[in-house]
Image (cartoon, grey):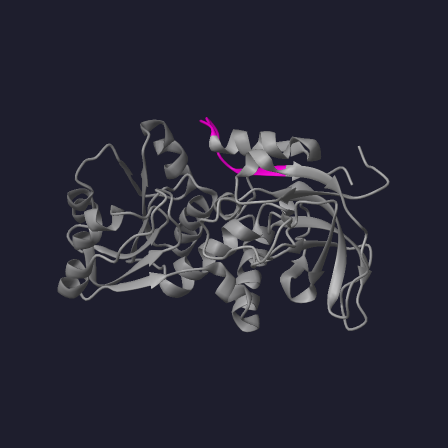
């Protein structure tokens, strides 16, 4: 239910989502290049959970701090230098390092560089669920891995939203997509999403599996969020000149580049962050154009797993962290 005064979820220390607090906040006027959004929905992302525990590649400059970088809402006010963004239109935030000014609130001031028009035909909840996963996947799969027929691409942990988006985009480009999961029950989901081959990882020989399914050619690129020593297990199955892309640390530890396989197979190790591409206006425009086009043709579709109310933000994190039988975005609907 809407309230007269806007609210925000904040954290006051690096002590995890259980210590988030819902408190009143002020309705602020935008600066010259800012807009003010009335947030209708915002999505949860694993990077936000890492940030709340100071395990992210960035840290907060001070506390209290809001969480979240992915939202959709209605433009309520625009700054004096803002052009072509109209009050009353629905816009989405783009992933960027927001410091203390996250989107977990009823209201948000944000620079015009980090918003984009909500795609036609999507609800606010759907519009809040697309940019992190599809933009995260677009640049490494299309621009770095150069997905196309004849290219073999490995996407470990394909049930994650970014991993699943990578499988979808890779299939759209005609590449041979390979994924991993720790559970046999996820095989059908990954195959439906775009995987041509699935390795159920119970500690078996992933290197032999990759050599087999690529007919000895090897993997041309991997988009790996796992971390620790996982790359060591498959690096010798990479094609010569292949690229190992690291974009996360699901194990809690970042990967150490597998030096010997890199020497022997002339591999490239590339740490990847979407923020660098969003901050580059030309690159960001390419990524947005791809996603808009794919959504308009139905080639990509938002998948929302569950929606929680504003008051249920902590419950939403518990759900995301717990065992799940379905996958997709977890989204908060503010009611604002």
Rendered location of residue 49, percent (x, y) = 51, 43
- Decide if residue 33 is on the left or right side of residue 198: right
Q: Residue furthest right?
A: 4
For residue 18, above or below residue 63: above
Residue at the image position 66 percent from the left and 60 percent from the top: 115
The x and y percentages for residue 250 are 38, 43
Q: Nearer the viewer, residue 228 or 164?
A: 228
Q: Position of residue 296 (x, y in %)?
A: 60, 53
* Quadrant where the C terminus is found in the figure: top right
Query: Which x, y percent locates residue 184?
Result: 31, 28
Q: Can residue 128 be spotted in the picture?
A: yes
Q: Which residues are magenta?
A: 322-331
Residue 145 appears in the rendering: no
Q: Image point 39% across, 50% down: which residue?
A: 248
Q: Is residue 187 above or below residue 289?
A: above
Left or right of 318 in this view: 81: right
Q: Quadrant of residue 142?
A: bottom left
Quadrant of the image containing the N terminus: top right
**Residue at position x 77%, y 46% in the image:** 25
Q: Nearer the viewer, residue 236 or 229?
A: 229
Relative horizontal placement of residue 314, taking residue 177 as reference (left or right): right
Numbered label tally: 0
Q: Residue at x 62, y 51 (%)?
A: 63
The one nearer the camera, 48 or 221, is: 48
Judged by its main secondary structure, the magenta piece is loop
| 325 falls in the magenta region | yes
Residue 74 position (above or below residue 264): above
Residue 142 colored in magenta in the image: no
Task: Out of 135 and 279, give the one closest to the viewer.
Answer: 279
């Amino acid at each position: 239910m809407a309230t007269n005064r806007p609210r925000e979820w904040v954290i006051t220390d690096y002590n995890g989502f259980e210590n988030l607090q819902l408190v009143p906040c002020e309705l602020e006027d935008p600066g010259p290049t800012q807009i003010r959004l009335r947030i209708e929905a915002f999505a949860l992302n694993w990077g936000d959970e890492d940030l709340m525990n100071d395990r992210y590649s960035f840290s907060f400059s001070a506390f209290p701090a809001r969480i979240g970088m992915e939202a959709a809402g209605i433009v309520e006010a625009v700054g004096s230098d803002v052009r072509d963004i109209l009050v009353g239109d629905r816009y989405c935030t783009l992933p960027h390092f927001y410091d203390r000014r996250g989107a977990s609130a009823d209201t948000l001031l944000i620079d015009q560089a980090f918003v984009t028009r909500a795609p036609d035909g999507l609800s606010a909840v759907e519009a809040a669920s697309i940019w992190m996963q599809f933009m995260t996947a677009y640049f490494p799969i299309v621009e770095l891995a150069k997905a196309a027929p004849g290219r073999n691409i490995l996407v470990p942990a394909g049930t994650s939203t970014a991993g699943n988006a990578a499988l979808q985009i890779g299939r759209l480009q005609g590449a041979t997509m390979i994924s991993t999961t720790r559970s046999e029950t996820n095989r059908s989901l990954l195959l439906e999403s775009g995987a041509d081959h699935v390795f159920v990882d119970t500690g078996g020989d992933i290197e032999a599996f990759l050599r087999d399914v690529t007919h000895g050619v090897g993997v041309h690129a991997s988009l790996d969020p796992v971390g620790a020593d996982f790359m060591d297990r498959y690096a010798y199955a990479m094609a010569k000149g292949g690229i190992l892309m690291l974009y996360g640390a699901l194990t809690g530890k970042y990967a150490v580049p597998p030096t010997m396989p890199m020497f022997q197979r002339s591999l490239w190790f590339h740490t990847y962050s979407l923020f660098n591409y969003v901050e580059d206006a030309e690159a960001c425009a390419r990524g947005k154009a791809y996603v808009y086009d794919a959504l308009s043709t139905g080639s990509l579709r938002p998948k929302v797993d569950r929606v929680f109310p504003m008051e249920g933000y902590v419950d939403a994190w518990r759900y995301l962290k717990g065992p799940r039988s379905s996958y997709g975005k977890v989204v908060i609907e503010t009611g604002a």
